[in-house]
Amino acid sequence: MKILLLAPHPFYQERGTPIAVDLLLRVLSGLGHTVDLLAYPEGQDRVYPGLRILRVAAGRWARGVPPGPSWKKLALDARMLPQALKMARTGNYDLIHAVEEATLMACHIRRRTGLPYVYDMDSSIARQLVEKYPLLRPALTPLARAEARALHDALGVVAVCDDLAEIARAAGARRVDVLRDIALLDRGAAFEPGALRREWNAPGTLFLYVGNLERYQGIDLLLQSFARARLPEARLAIAGGAAPKIAAYRDQAGRLGLAQRVLFLGHQPVTRLAELCDAADVLVSPRIQGGNTPMKVYSYMASGKALLATALPTHTQVLTPETACLVTPTPEAMAEAMERLAGDPALRERLGAAARAEAGMRYSWTAYRATAETFYRWIEREIVGARQPAAEAHAP
């Protein structure tokens, strides 16, 4: 098939959704499909058989698009829609694969051209907007209706987690498959075990967070919890985030008396993730909002290190008390869990081993590829099947 893939974000960048799109491109290329990818101006090119990357036309203002909803993203989406519509009309495509809010564009294009689309659901558009911009709460109902219409009209939906899959099924989606993220640890990466701990001067328990520093990730909760925990020798390393966010959280750590105990590492390449996890005793995911499971969780699990996370659906649809220490999202509960994990190496070992076994069975590249290939073979059969009656009707 010839596929128009709409990716409304920088591509390629080492962060959640772009990484997921890159994984999908590997599958589609392997199946022999031709893909035209339309993405934002910013990002690195990727080279796969059958892939062509096109970018939304925009000036220098389009650089530095943050994760999640933003006014800059809205402006770029407004430019993406007419470009996508023109491509759909002239590109002789069989299908649109639309990621996140691009499915609203695909729904519009379908009404104009009849071109079917797949909804790649990494988040709930309506819920994500209202969580980030509470002033938009009065618009929640019309936003939810638009999202439900896009889900209902899609040829198929791939959801990144069970929570989003339930939203799609409730909207009457024709077919919904859960295409989970996978662990991204580079097993071939060479590093000296213990070198990072010596570099960071971390003689006690080392807690590690990896990811962006947007509010929904719960970094405020993490810092408050670490300040409350009675662990004077412990260290907290935070990898990721843009410079303004790092500066703000460094100031907050100073106000909490943690200036010498919290290490802000800045952006770290995915290729270094295995080394970072190896250095830590406990890996932390303090997310406080959202229904999708953080991509980091799968790498955390595969590392074999103990995992501490908030007991919210964003985590509990993947993690269980057997594979992670799950706590209510309060500084008191998380601080108590930090103290318990720091003082119980056997507990850390047991949680880490169970999580690694689960990740090996369910969240590997092999499992991802099998799910994606099954879904896309069904999509191809549906498209071919829909064309046969039309061809027969035009036969002499």
Image (tube, helix red, strand yellow):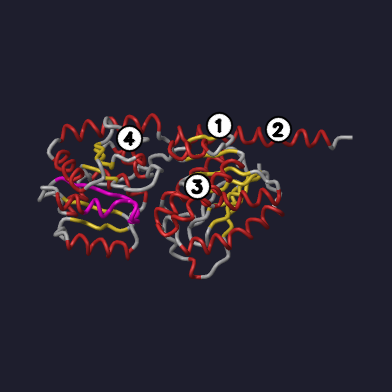
Give me the disc on residue 374.
1
Q: Are marks 4 and 3 in contact (CB under 8 Å)?
A: no
Position of residue 246 measured from the top left corner of the image (x, y, whole percent) = 29, 62
Direction from residue 322 to residue 35 in the image, left or right? right
- SS at circle 4: loop
* Residue sitting at the far right: 396
- SS at circle 2: helix
Give me the disc on residue 385.
2
Observer-nearest of 40 and 177: 177
| Disc nearer the start of the sequence (1/2) | 1
Q: Residues within 10 Å of mark 3 (few under 14, many from 20)?
A: some
Direction from residue 175 to residue 248 in the image, left or right? left
Q: Are marks 4 and 2 in contact (CB under 8 Å)?
A: no
For the residues marked 1 and 2, what is the alpha-carbon distance in whole angstroms?
17 Å
Residue span colored magenta: 205-223
- SS at circle 1: helix
Circle 3 or circle 2, nearest the eye = 2
Three-letter amino acid code of the residue under disc 3: Val
Observer-nearest of 356 and 315: 315
Q: Residue at x 26, y 53 (%)?
A: 238
| Disc nearer the start of the sequence (1/3) | 3
Direction from residue 212 to residue 116 in the image, left or right? right
